[in-house]
Image (spheres, helix red, strand yellow):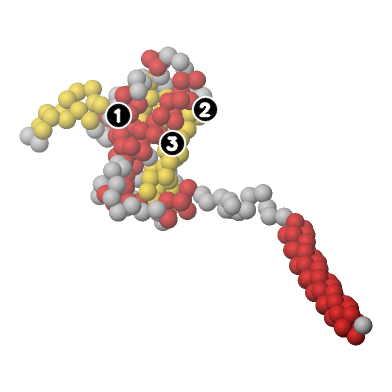
Amino acid sequence: MFYKLSAIAGLTATLALTGCSITQNNEHNESINTRSDYTVVTQSSQPKPMYANQSVQQQSEYDTARQFTPLKHHKTLANYVEQMALDLVDTLEAEAPDNNSINIAVTTIVDLDASLNKSNQLGNQLAETFIHQLQKFGYGVVDFKTMDNIDVSNRGDFVLSRDIEKLSESSMANYVLAGTLIYRPNGVAVNTRVINVHSKHIVASSRKLIPLYVLNKEDIYLSSN
């Protein structure tokens, strides 16, 4: 009888301990679940922005170019002028589908200042390259600096001049290409437009930033004339 009571008492104690362990484990699991639920609720209560992976402020083309300066590159000034000429041509085709009806006089690209009559090597070189690109795309280009006569001298034979007295007063151009230069720390912003000579309406425009490393590679001086 004594052994039975001892066995029953031992079994009761074992069950009691097991129950306590189960109760503690359940409480521990509930605590974990409670903390997990709390964490989930906390995260869901503060949703991430839709564009969390994107920059809040859009970087301008100037900022982007400032960050990137390749050690070696094959870009030239002509590449950028060609892209700008393509932009102009896309709009010009809508203005006049027949290229033969458009004759463009290309002027020097000038500094954007109060006078609008200062330029430099870059402005003149841009104008010369635009003449080539527009003519290559099939548009008539009028060189108003061409004299009526060839000037023959010991220094050479010349047909181009900036002396207005030697130039023709009439011009066959019905459109003119003009533009401005804006100097940035990382390059030069070039703005160009094609203007109807008679109505003064802008029929096409283009804008491009030429990085400073491209200009340095071609030894282009930016000081005004």
Q: Which residue is at the front of the view, 167 or 75?
A: 75
Q: Which residue is mark 3?
A: 192
Circle 1 Cα neighbour tier, 10 Å, few/some/many (<14 / 14–19 / ≥20): some
Mark 2 crowd level (few <14, some 14–19, many ≥20, 10 Å Cα): few
Q: Is residue 125 above or below residue 16?
A: above
Seen from this angle, which residue lies furthest left? Answer: 154
Q: Is residue 162 visible?
A: yes
Of 155 and 121, which appears nearest the observer? 121
- From mark 2 to mark 3, how far is it between C-alphas? 14 Å
Does the CB distance between marks 2 and 3 fall below 8 Å? no
Residue 66 tag number: none
Give the Cα separation between the discs numbered 2 and 1. Answer: 24 Å
Pinpoint residue 16: horizontal percent, then vertical percent.
86, 77
Secondary structure found at label 1: helix
Q: Which mark is residue 201?
A: 2
Identify the residue position indicated by label 1 in the image: 132
**41 left or right of 183?**
right
Amino acid type at image mark 1: His
Q: Looking at the image, is mark 2 or mark 3 earlier in the sequence?
A: 3
Residue 51 lies, in percent from the top left, at: 63, 50
Tell me what residue is drawn at x 24 percent, y 26 percent.
147
- Which three-letter amino acid code belongs to the residue tagged 3? Thr
As displayed, is residue 208 above or below residue 217? Answer: above
Element class at badge 3: strand
Residue 89 position (above or below residue 32): above
- Position of 195 with respect to 46 (left or right) is left
Residue 114 visible somewhere in the drawing = no
**Snapshot quadrant of residue 88:** top left
Q: Is residue 81 left or right of residue 163?
A: right
Q: Are marks 2 and 1 in contact (CB under 8 Å)?
A: no
